[in-house]
Amino acid sequence: MAAIKRENLRKRIEKDLKNQLKDKWIVGNHYSDMIQDYLSLWDLKCDLINDIRKYGTKIAGMHGPKSNPAINDLHKTNAQMLKILSELGLNASPNEPKDDDDEF
C-alpha cells in the first residue's frame, strides 16, 4: 500500500512542477529532463529515509557502531534537489498532511 501512496505523491509532485514551468512560460525538453532528474533524486531520498527508519542512525561497523551512511547521502540528495529547483526557478510543493505511519 505504501508503494501506491508513494507513486501517487510522485505523480502529484511531477504535475505540480510541470505546471509551475508552464505558468512561468518556461519551455524546452531540457527543463522536462531536469524535472525527471529531480524526481529520480526524490525516489532516492525516499529510499534513504526508509533505510534510516529500518536500520536507524547508527549501524554496526568494524570497530563498533558508526553513523548510517544514508544520513550523509540524504543530506547531499536534498541539497541537489534544492539546486535543481533553484535552477528552474521553481518552488517545492507545499507539504500535505500525512499519516505518521506512511512510508515512502
Image (cartoon, grey):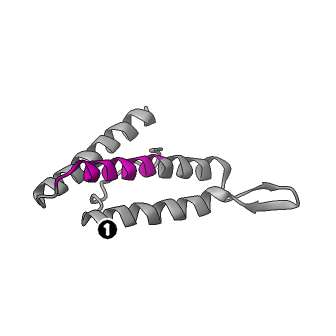
- Please give the name of the residue rendered at 76% of the width and 62% of the height, measured from the top-left corner: 66
- Residue 46's place in the image compared with 23, above or below, is above
Q: Is residue 17 above or below residue 103?
A: below
The image shows a total of numbered marks equal to 1
Please name the predominant secondary structure of the magenta segment in the image. helix
Tell whether 36 sits left or right of 50. left
Q: Tell whether 58 sits left or right of 5.
A: right
Between 15 and 27, the residue placed more toward the observer is 27
Q: Which residue lies at the image location 28% right of the left edge and 51% below the top edge?
A: 30
**What segment carries the magenta color?**
27-43
- The N terminus sits in image quarter: top left
> Which residue is tagged 1?
86
Choose between 31 and 92: the one closer to the eye. Answer: 31
Percent of width and height locating residue 26: 16, 58
View extreme (right): residue: 63
Crowd around label 1: few <14 · some 14–19 · many ≥20 (10 Å) = few
Frontmost residue, 59 versus 99: 59
Q: Residue at x 44, y 51 (%)?
A: 41
Residue 35: x %, y % from top left: 31, 51
Describe residue 19's horizontal placement relative to residue 7 as left or right.
left
Instruction: Please tell me whether residue 4 is drawn above or below residue 94 in the rendered image.
Output: above
Residue 10 sits inside the magenta stretch: no
Point out residue 93 in the picture as x, y percentages from the top left corner. Answer: 27, 58
Say if the magenta span includes residue 29: yes
- Residue at image point 30% right, 61% down: 92
SS type, badge 1: helix
Task: Say what amino acid the circle numbered 1 marks.
Answer: Ser
- The image shows residue 48 at horizontal and vertical percentages of 55, 51
- Side of 54 where 63 appears, left or right: right
